[in-house]
Image (cartoon, coloured by chain):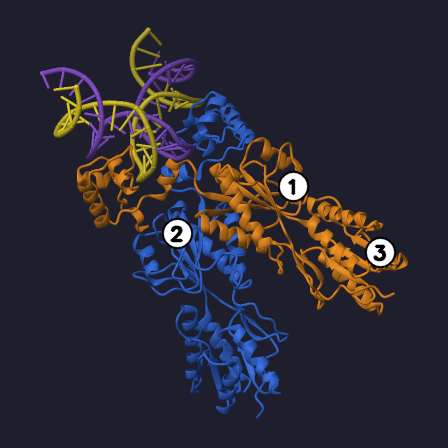
Chain colours: A blue, B orange, C yellow, D purple
Amino acid sequence: MTGSRRRVTQQDIARMTGVSQATVSLVLNGRDDGSVRIAPETRERVLSAIRSTGYVADPVARRLAARHNRILGVFTYEPVFPAGTGDFYHPFLVGIEESAERLGCDLLLLTSAPVTDGRRRIFHDDNRLRLADGCVLLGRSLDRDELGRLVAEGHPFVSVGRRDDAGGPVPYVGADYATATADMVRRALDAGHTRLAYLGQGGGPESHTDRFAGYRTALDAAGLPTRHEPTDRSPTDLLDALLAAGVTAVMVEEYADGVALATVAAERGLTVPADLSILALGDPTRPTTSDLEFTGFRIPRREMGWQAVEVLTGLLAGVPGTATQRLLPCQPVDGVTLLPPRH
Amino acid sequence: MTGSRRRVTQQDIARMTGVSQATVSLVLNGRDDGSVRIAPETRERVLSAIRSTGYVADPVARRLAARHNRILGVFTYEPVFPAGTGDFYHPFLVGIEESAERLGCDLLLLTSAPVTDGRRRIFHDDNRLRLADGCVLLGRSLDRDELGRLVAEGHPFVSVGRRDDAGGPVPYVGADYATATADMVRRALDAGHTRLAYLGQGGGPESHTDRFAGYRTALDAAGLPTRHEPTDRSPTDLLDALLAAGVTAVMVEEYADGVALATVAAERGLTVPADLSILALGDPTRPTTSDLEFTGFRIPRREMGWQAVEVLTGLLAGVPGTATQRLLPCQPVDGVTLLPPRH
DNA sequence: CAACGTAGCTAATGCGTATTAGCGAAGAAA
DNA sequence: TTTCTTCGCTAATACGCATTAGCTACGTTG
């Protein structure tokens, strides 16, 4: 290591320019209101020293002293740069990054959270949550207890994706899966389908619950029966069951399951959508390839990331008008997997 | 915000148990070595107070005192979360994240670097570099001057990818392109090829220089002539030139160029590899699709990211034994684009 | 000319922790 | 008794920054 490993501090800048550390701090923070005055010449001198040294305020000290440092944490329950989940999380991060950059905030990936019992923990003995002013939470399902603790301890945070209350309202920017799914059901109904099935968990994480709720609501409104197919059996068995029940359109919670179903159907000599319509309730969360473009909807992921940061900074600034629970509309996709049923 | 109530501090614990703040800190850190002694009874008293209050050390203050923040900067010469698919940089980031997680470091994305003359600049007014303890640099070619400045100013950093000295040795974790390329050449020679061409820049960034060096070395050793094809003309013209020169195997610096070449060859009614063998010197850096699986090698990107963080933290900790310049072997890929030449 | 402003700065302090020099008491050695 | 140890602890300080009270020098005003 090349000798002086010490960072440049305000003290250094102060000595270089012959002013006090306090003055450097004042200049740095652009303080020039009624209570504080700095001669333009002095200001310039300090600024030029700052530029020449590349000085940046230590975020840690800054946070300790001022309780904020313009750093936003990003916590994910899966690796941020996922190997397995394909690019699903990517658009969220793009939005988060764009928004943060626009607001002049730095992004800190809270990667130091250790994995226990197969998932990351926010709270552990040396959690860095407080390093950042606030935090964006990302992940299909967030740990209820941890969420509750975040709320209880008053940590400023925003969830990407709707979350149920956890001992208090959870700020979130989510996708309106219920409405989007109901719309898809109506499309199928309009096309003439009367026997629709829902393939997926239909419960567990809020995103699944919401989809299923939308599905049920729309069918109830139409006075048609619902049918829920779990995902725990092979696509072959599933297809058998669907055909036996006379199902003509399937709403698929997980894109990949739709692909698998379509593949099996093709192997059987069936045609999608002529023999079976498939509607995808969102983007692929696992890497899959298919030459079919599924009819369904798109999750406004980038926009969600963007707005999440907006909500978070609003929260931090205490902006009163900020809606802290937002549901964004999904964009319908006209694909090729929906056709009227064969009589 | 509800965070208004003051958090419990060591001072509070100290008052509750009638000891000093220092003692609380000592107990907390389990200090009981030769220089420090705490009566078991006192220790118990403090610990129980800590338990009853749920006290947790403020990580911010902790890091201020520790004089480092365990934040690693990640600087890329492209957007960190690129919008394009098939992202070349992704695996590096996966490795970086994994390693950071293991080492308990957080990652700061240095994204707000402005773009000047078509590339991001590390150094500019308001560069956030010094926010982190050290920094990982990612990008095909790093600006020489900026590298030099990093070295000169003694900034702790590691480059992902080998770099020439820049006023001093540059810490890096690179891929051993020279060896990998030489191996590919030898494969071609073993298959019976004698007229090999190198398609690509062959210079510029170190990664290209290294590949070309490996190519040249292996051919020199075999007593065969080299042939260097630049990339500035159309694949069609290129193919003409290769065929005219009787070239039977091409080493391709850029995957995408190999794809383009294969495509043009196919259009001409030629078969790869029967009529022309193509060896890809690394993974695609641009999104390309091809149904050919190219023979060539794989860059150990994830491993490189992983080790880069390791080198950086070693550097920061001043670990003496740490090799700060590492070249990792590339993994050969048996594809379908190499066959003995027709003769 | 005294009283008073004002512009432009600095000294001092606090944020919550880690670390170290060193102090008082009690016991051991002489 | 005196001196030396050892134990158990505390006071003081540093970390780098933000904030505020207040000081000095230089007008301005009545």
Of all chains, the one bearing label 2 is A
Residue at point 41%, 52% (across, down): A113
Give how far apart the Cα atoms at labels 3 and 1 are. 31 Å
Image mark for residue A172: none
Of all chains, the one bearing label 1 is B
Q: In the image shown, does B300 or B120 lie closer to the viewer?
A: B300
Residue B80 vs A257, above or below: the answer is above
Give how far apart the Cα atoms at labels 1 and 2 are. 44 Å
Question: How crowded is the residue under tag 2: few (<14 C-alpha within 10 Å), some, or many (20+)?
Answer: many
A218 relative to B325 in the view: left or right: left
Residue B1 vs B319, above or below: the answer is below
The answer, for residue B80, to whether it is visible in the render is no
Residue A164 in picture, x, y percent from top left: 36, 65
Residue at point 65%, 35% (across, down): B166
- Quick one: which residue is furthest to the right in this view? B244
User: Quarter of the image containing the C terminus of chain B?
Assistant: bottom right
Q: What residue sits right under mark 2 in the picture?
A: A315
A246 relative to A316 in the view: left or right: right
Q: What residue sits right under mark 3 in the picture?
A: B195
Residue B75 in picture, x, y percent from top left: 57, 45
Question: How crowded is the residue under tag 3: few (<14 C-alpha within 10 Å), some, or many (20+)?
Answer: many
Q: What residue sits right under mark 1 in the picture?
A: B163
Q: Report the amino acid beneath label 1.
A: Arg
Of all chains, the one bearing label 3 is B
